[in-house]
Image (cartoon, rainbow, N blue to C red):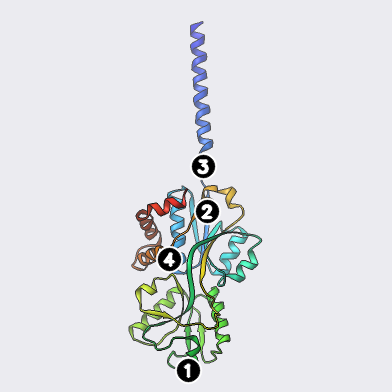
Amino acid sequence: MKKRQKLFTGIASFLVLVFAAFAFQSCEPETERIELGYVLWDSEIASTHVVAAVIEDRLGHEVNLTSVDAGPMWMGVARGDFDAIVAAWLPVTHEAYLEETQDRIVNLGPNLNGAKLGWVVPSYVPVNSIEELPEYADEFDGKITGIDPGAGLMAASERVMEEYELDDFQLVSGSDAAMTAELRRAIDREEWIVVTGWTPHWKFAAFDLKYLEDPKKTLGEEEHIATIVTPELEGKAPDVYGFLDNFYWTPDEMAEVMVLIEDGMEPIDAARQWISENPERVNSWLQ
């Protein structure tokens, strides 16, 4: 009788352990592959890699990053190719993309306030307003140095060309990297140059620059950068959704990451260094 009781007790204990192990495994969060899209602006490289590092290192999910132009970035999140983007410039720069996709996305609101768009010149250039540019077409070699052609800033700059009747100028597209390289070369030679610019950006820490006044407000006023996600993300990875809903930082914090990258550090390494140095800020995103 005692042997039988011991046998039953042993079987019961074994079943309890098996059930507990199964229950523990079933309670563990599932690992998901999170797709993030971003544009190759220095600001968005910084923010997207910080987000990716938090999702991978703190939440335990795999992250895949894809750099695209602004239009494909918005369409990607609207189609579900991307789970999220943290690179939506609103209300002006990406206004058209938001209008086209707003029924298929979730706008989690600003992740950074105090952003700005404009045209920028070195401070040694004695021009202070876009209205003055027609008088100095030769000095600027008839060129406005821009970024990637799909950027909202470029579409806004096309409107500036029309509004201010800059018939003797050409808006030249390229990339963020090409624009800053042209800016650096011009400053080294003390030449006149106008570039499309935005804040936050590391170039304002590296060079003595100024925004040209825009009396007609064609480039808008203060902007914010927003986080956009797919409607399915909350069900797919609620911890990632919650983190992205809380993700918010300042232009100065973003600039710290941008400077590390500009100094030669790989974006993901710069992101991880910043995260390690700012635990309180990161913890606030994960509450």
Secondary structure of residue under mark 3: loop
Q: Is residue 59 above or below residue 230?
A: above
| Earlier sequence position, callout 4 versus callout 2 | 2
Q: Residue 158: which quarter of the image?
A: bottom right
| Earlier sequence position, callout 3 versus callout 2 | 3
> Of the residues shown, which amino acid type is indicated by label 2?
Ile
| Earlier sequence position, callout 3 versus callout 4 | 3
Residue 102 screen position, x and y as percent: 64, 63
The label shown at residue 209 is none
* Location of mark 1 (residue): 135
| Earlier sequence position, callout 1 versus callout 4 | 1
The label shown at residue 34 is 2
Alpha carbon separation for disc pair 1 and 4: 34 Å
Residue at 60% in and 56% down:
230
- Which-is-in-front pick, marks 3 and 4? 4
Residue at 59% in and 48% down:
235
Q: Residue 159: which quarter of the image?
A: bottom right
- Which-is-in-front pick, marks 1 and 3? 1
* Location of mark 4 (residue): 251
Secondary structure of residue under mark 1: helix
In the rendered view, does 234 fall on the left or right side of 177?
right
Secondary structure of residue under mark 2: strand
| Earlier sequence position, callout 1 versus callout 3 | 3
Query: How many neighbours does mark 4 have within 10 angstroms: few (below 14), some (14-19), or many (20 or more)?
Result: some
Taking depth in this image into account, of 207 and 170 the one nearest to the observer is 207
Give yes or no for contact between labels 1 and 3 (Cβ–Cβ under 8 Å).
no
* Location of mark 3 (residue): 29
Residue at 51% in and 75% down:
148
Give yes or no for contact between labels 3 and 4 (Cβ–Cβ under 8 Å).
no
> Of the residues shown, which amino acid type is indicated by label 4?
Pro
Alpha carbon separation for disc pair 4 and 2: 25 Å
Alpha carbon separation for disc pair 2 and 1: 51 Å
